[in-house]
Image (cartoon, rainbow, N blue to C red):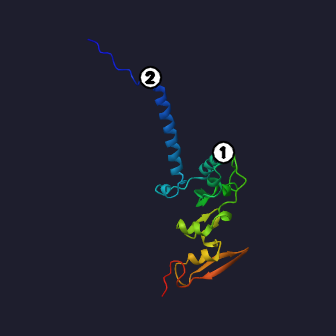
Amino acid sequence: MIKRMNRRGQAGGEWGTIIAVVIAAILLVLVILVMTGFFGPIGDLFGSFPKLGVAVSTCNLFAQGGQIDDYCNVPKKVEIDGLKQYATCKYLETKATLETKIDDCTGIVDKQDFAAFCDNMKLSEKILVDGKSCEDTPYNTEAAAKASCKKAGDIVKYKAGTETKSHTCAEGEGSISPA
């Protein structure tokens, strides 16, 4: 006796293949982004600083996709001239030729509190962000400088208009507990 197989659900098998290919492509893109450090701390698990060419390719994708915030304001790990640093795509325009650019952005130094980025990422003074040392970068306001105090007597810099000023940390400021 010959049994016939139930063929229900077998029609449209090509759709399953298409869906599998799309999912595989999405996973591949996510793995590449994680490995190149574009997801911040998750990428830190791999400790990778991609070469300039990899960062430029990713920046081209951001520009083509119109991802202004990722292009202009989110620093990514990159190795430039042998130096491991963080850079926005806008800054990378000065280091390499990008096929596609987004002209209407200010970059992290102008848009965000640059020194706060260095503190939040717990970067050492020797690390560069958009070509500037974390050590040499002033806070955008005196209040932000005071809030960054960690030890009485430390000197922090902040902007006052176009001028850079210094503040000496005292008890009760930032993470310094009052006596």
Cα gap from disc 1 to disc 2, whole angstroms: 38 Å
Quadrant hosting residue 143: bottom right
Q: Amino acid at mark 2?
A: Ala
Residue 69 percent coordinates (x, y): 63, 55
Q: Is residue 12 above or below residue 101?
A: above
Q: Which residue is mark 2?
A: 11
Q: Secondary structure at mark 2?
A: loop
| Mark carried by residue 64 | 1
Q: Position of residue 1 (x, y in %)?
A: 26, 11
Q: Is residue 13 above or below residue 143?
A: above
Q: Residue at x 58, y 57 (%)?
A: 76
Crowding near the residue tagged with mark 1, few <14, some 14–19, many ≥20 C-alpha atoms within 10 Å: some
User: Which residue appears at 64% of the width and 53% of the height?
Assistant: 71
Amino acid of disc 1:
Gln
Q: Is residue 52 visible?
A: yes
Q: Please identify, in this view, whether the residue under mark 1 or under mark 2 is nearer the observer.
A: 2
Q: Residues within 10 Å of mark 2 (few under 14, many from 20)?
A: few
Q: Is 137 situated above or below 28?
A: below
Query: Where does residue 120 sit, x and y in percent of width and height?
Result: 54, 67
Work out whether residue 123 can be spotted: no
Closer to the chain start, of discs 1 and 2, is 2
